[in-house]
Amino acid sequence: MDKETAEKIKRRGETAIRELTSILVLDQIERECSPDEYEAGRRAIGLAIGIIDTELLSIVYRQFPELDPID
């Protein structure tokens, strides 16, 4: 992939992670869901974020380490 494509993937992957994370901070979610439902949702969101990070963004960062915000 070229750097322009890598930057697009990075932006959209990071946006997806932010959107998924934002679900957990909605006050009504914890209030209106049972503890089991809330924990299942947290687990699913964590898994989705992990996959985006390890299977999508890591490809970008391996090819373009300068795009990795941690380095």
Image (tube, rainbow, N blue to C red):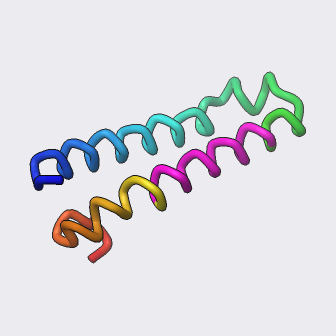
Q: In this view, does 5 lie above or below 27?
A: below
Name the residue nearer the viewer: 39 or 7. 7
Q: Is residue 15 above or below residue 66?
A: above
Task: Examine the image and state in which quarter residue 26 appears.
Answer: top right
Instruction: Judge left or right: residue 48 versus residue 59.
Output: right
Q: In which quarter of the image is the C terminus?
A: bottom left
Q: What stretch is highlighted in magenta?
A: 40-53
Q: Main secondary structure of the magenta part?
A: helix
Q: How many marks?
A: 0
Q: Is 50 contained in the magenta span?
A: yes
Task: Examine the image and state in which quarter residue 36 appears.
Answer: top right
In the image, residue 58 lies at what x, y percent? Answer: 38, 63
Q: At x 48% / y 61%, what residue is drawn?
A: 54
Instruction: Judge left or right: residue 9 versus residue 47.
Output: left
Q: Is residue 8 above or below residue 28?
A: below
Q: At x 88% / y 38%, what residue is drawn?
A: 35
Q: Is 32 contained in the magenta span?
A: no
Q: In this view, does 2 lie above or below 9?
A: below
Q: Which residue lies furthest to the front in this view?
A: 1
